[in-house]
Amino acid sequence: MKRTFISVGGVLFVAWFIIAIISTPGCGKGQVMDGDITVLKEGALTEKNQRQLFAAQPPPTFDYSLERENLIKKLKLMNKQNAVFYIYCLGLNGNVVYHGMVKGKVSSLNSLLTTPEQLVSLVNVRNGTGVHRMPSPDFDGSYGKNPEGVFWFDPADQYHEWTGTYYLSQMPERINTPISITSSLDQEKKGK
């Protein structure tokens, strides 16, 4: 006796397709559009091919993941309070615009301490009371999104912000291009 297996993906595709046909105007009355049968046949062929490939070449299972190991090492490294990194901010032409030290970690300008949305109970005259998602204000009372970018603190606890591409390393790198931005502290050290 030959068994026929239908995968969850195949069942979901067929269910989705039936719902799409029923909800399409004019198709809920038993009408089938010309392209519908082809779509079903193509979906069935794709599913059959995938089933054969899965049986012939099942994905391997691992006892250990190097990807997970890297993620764990990165998380532990980036969560050290006094870790020191070297950051190289790059201009559009690839030249180093600024370089300096980072104490702790580089953080996203869009990191938040609280949720970006809150559930609010609103009264709607027609539908009664309902719970809706609303944007949460920041702690300064403002709404909106920050620019895409990062910020960090240097070993002197000075704040820095960058909205471009950067390179981060645990060790200082040699720079072969002229630096566009230098801090006043660098200039003061040169003048002494």
Image: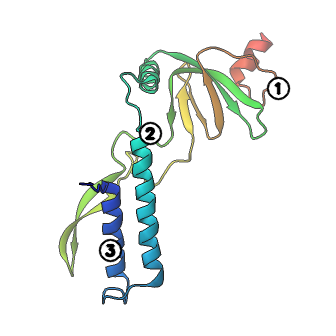
Q: Which of marks 1 and 3 is in front?
A: 3
Q: Please state which amino acid type lies under the numbered disc 2.
A: Gln
- Residue annotated with mark 2: 57
Q: What element carries label 2?
A: loop
Q: Which residue is drawn at 56% across and 47% down?
A: 147
Give the image quarter of residue 148: top right
Q: Which residue is drawn at 30% across and 90% down?
A: 29
Q: Residues within 10 Å of mark 2 (few under 14, many from 20)?
A: few
Disc 1/disc 3 C-alpha distance (Å):
63 Å
Q: Are marks 1 and 2 in contact (CB under 8 Å)?
A: no
Q: Which residue is drawn at 48% across and 51% down?
A: 145
Q: Which of 25 and 84 is in front in this view?
A: 25
Q: What element carries label 3?
A: helix
Looking at the rendered structure, which numbered label has been put on residue 45? none
Q: Which of marks 3 and 2 is nearer the N terminus?
A: 3
Q: Residues within 10 Å of mark 3 (few under 14, many from 20)?
A: some
